[in-house]
Amino acid sequence: MGIEIRIFMMISIMLCLRSAVHAAQGNAVYHPPPHKQIKKIWKASACFGKRENGRMVAGVIDALWSKGKACGRRCEQ
């Protein structure tokens, strides 16, 4: 493999890993889908109350929560 290709590959790898380095650290939680929940009761959430708002649920630490500013924010995992 030529030196140009090796340099190109190293730069590509470094650029791909850049987003992982700058990610915020947090804790994830899991809630079972409604058909697997006991008695099919929706648990209230701090953002949306008892209203169902999709399947994607994330739990965050207080630093990321920021008194509700995290509500509706999209996060990458």
Image (cartoon, helix red, strand yellow):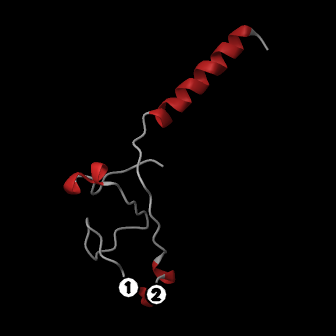
Q: Quadrant of the N terminus?
A: top right
Q: Which amino acid does label 1 sit on?
A: Ile
Observer-nearest residue: 41 or 65?
A: 65
Observer-nearest residue: 27 or 56?
A: 27
Residue 46 % position (x, y): 26, 67
Q: In which quarter of the image is residue 11?
A: top right
Q: Which residue lies furthest to the bottom in this view?
A: 39
Q: In this view, does 53 lie to the left or right of 30?
A: left
Residue 41, label in figure = 1
Q: What residue type is labelled 2?
A: Ile
Q: Residue furthest left?
A: 67
Q: Name the residue under label 2.
A: 38
- Classify 77 as above or below 2: below
Proximity of marks 1 and 2: CB atoms separated by less than 8 Å: yes
Disc 2 packing (10 Å; few <14; some 14–19; many ≥20): few
Residue 77 % position (x, y): 48, 49
Q: Residue at x 25, y 73 (%)?
A: 49
- The number of callouts visible is 2
Residue 69 % position (x, y): 22, 52
Q: In this view, does 74 lie to the left or right of 16?
A: left
Please, what secondary structure does the residue beneath circle 2 have?
helix
- Classify 71 as above or below 40: above
Q: Residue at x 39, y 49 (%)?
A: 75
Q: In this view, does 25 lie to the left or right of 7?
A: left
